[in-house]
Image: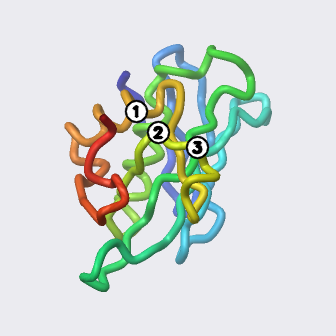
Amino acid sequence: MKTKVIKDNWPERIIQIPSGEKIRLTADDPDDVTRVSVENSKNEEIGHIGFFRFEPGDQGDEALLLTALDLDRLGPKYIHQGIGRAILQMVNDHNVLPILAACPLDPSDRNDGAHLTGNGPNFVRKMRELDLIKAGCDGNCLCGLD
């Protein structure tokens, strides 16, 4: 789904979703993003997307690992509206670290707490096609979701 950027004042961005409603995206830290919170036009929390800064593999380069996709606190109304995509675009616009995603594993199986369930794997596949999430492999299932 396409969204429209209404206001971009890092670490905050206001977008308009297809229904016409304005949504506020707020990064927790402009220099070290670990969470982007989402509120609707009534200042109700829709949810958040979480990130964990880490060094994949032996290359020493840092990346952001997508650790949480929680955008359904108010029910399914805000799912498939382009909000997750808008968050990734916002983070990529203002951050030099690549975003990676992990497999749909139980969080107790990963020391970073990352796991993608429900719509997560399909979301990641689509975002990789758009190059908003990078494909990468660290030997811990960061390169694929199968």
Q: Which mark is residue 104?
A: 2
Q: CA distance from mark 3 to mark 1?
A: 13 Å
Query: Residue at horizontal 65%, vertical 63%?
Result: 28
Query: Residue at horizontal 45%, vertical 60%?
Result: 65
Query: On the rendered image, what quadrant is the N terminus found in?
Result: top left
Q: Position of residue 124 (x, y in %)?
A: 36, 38
Q: Secondary structure at mark 2?
A: loop
Query: On the rendered image, what quadrant is the C terminus found in?
Result: top left
Q: Hey, what amino acid is under mark 2? A: Pro
Q: Hey, what amino acid is under mark 3? A: Asp
Q: Which mark is residue 27?
A: none
Q: Nearer the viewer, residue 134 or 6?
A: 134
- Dot 3, how many residues are within 10 Å of its Cα: few (below 14), some (14-19), or many (20+)? few
Q: Which residue is mark 1?
A: 121
Q: Is residue 63 above or below residue 99?
A: below
Residue depth check, mark 1 versus mark 2: number of the one nearer the observer:
2
Q: Which residue is mark 3?
A: 106
Query: Could you tell whether 58 is left or right of 39 in the image?
Result: left
Q: Position of residue 79 (x, y in %)?
A: 54, 21
Q: Secondary structure at mark 3?
A: loop
Q: Decide: marks 1, 2 in contact (CB < 8 A)?
A: yes
Q: Hey, what amino acid is under mark 1? A: Pro
